[in-house]
Amino acid sequence: MGKTIKTKEVTIEEISSQEDFKQFVAMMEVTGQLKNFDELALDEQREVINKYYLWKDKGSPKAEMPKLKDEKEHEILKLYRVKHRGIQYLWYMTTDGQRIGLDYEEIHNQEDEYDENNQPTGRKTEGKTIVDRKPHYTIEYTKQKGEELLALASKYNDYPNCYFVNGPNNKVKCSDPETEFNVDGKEMIKLMAQAPGHKGRRV
């Protein structure tokens, strides 16, 4: 038979006012086992109190804090520094497949518009075929932001994949991101020009 509380001798109010009980409830909350003790039904409160007594019987062990990860923190797989129309930007791919800092505007084909009698109106309407995709960058490059993202990428990978991009067909992988990735803009272009491989590609 499991141990039950002696509700006739000690009231729930008396138990819930005890410091040990408050500590127990706080541990249940931080480990996701309980939301709000005061909002529970009477039977549910009794179940929590039963667990409290079992916890006391086991010597009041401390709760193990779960490993918490900041939901805003991304695990960076690839980090890019891009020069686009004279402005530098940053974007990156995460290990779970997200693309952060770069969206694409899809350009569709134009088709003749027809009225309800299937006669041409002389106007054009957007078709379903995608004929082009224009990049839209949202994180403008600064040295501080570049260092911040490089540090985050390095947190999960000793040798993060970092790239310089200048135009649609010119991408260079940094051989040493720690010293190369956040050089000034002119030095970035110089490194790209000196990189081995076709059109500055470095693999």
Image (cartoon, grey):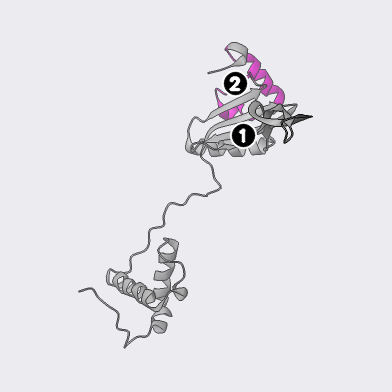
Which residue occupies the extreme bottom position in the image?
8
Which residue occupies the extreme left position in the image?
1
> In screen coordinates, is 180 left or right of 53?
right
Q: How many marks?
A: 2
Classed neighbour count for the residue bearing mark 2: other residues with Cα under 10 Å, few (<14), some (14–19), many (≥20): many
Residue lying at 65% horizontally and 21% vertically, measured from the top left? 168
Image coordinates of residue 90 in percent, x first then y, are 64, 33
Task: Report the magenta residues as a range.
Answer: 169-197
The CA span between labels 2 and 1 is 15 Å
Image coordinates of residue 197 in percent, x first then y, are 57, 12
The quarter of the image holding the N terminus is: bottom left
Image coordinates of residue 106 in percent, x first then y, are 66, 31
Residue 95 vs 9, above or below: the answer is above
Tell me which amino acid carries mark 2. Val
Residue lying at 51% horizontally and 31% vertically, measured from the top left? 160
Which quadrant of the figure has residue 89?
top right
Q: Are marks 2 and 1 in contact (CB under 8 Å)?
A: no
Which residue, given by chain and number where applicable, does mark 2 sit on? 172
Image coordinates of residue 42 in percent, x first then y, are 39, 78
Mark 1 falls on what kind of element?
strand
Which residue occupies the extreme top position in the image?
198
Which residue occupies the extreme front position in the image?
117
Which residue, given by chain and number where applicable, does mark 1 sit on? 91
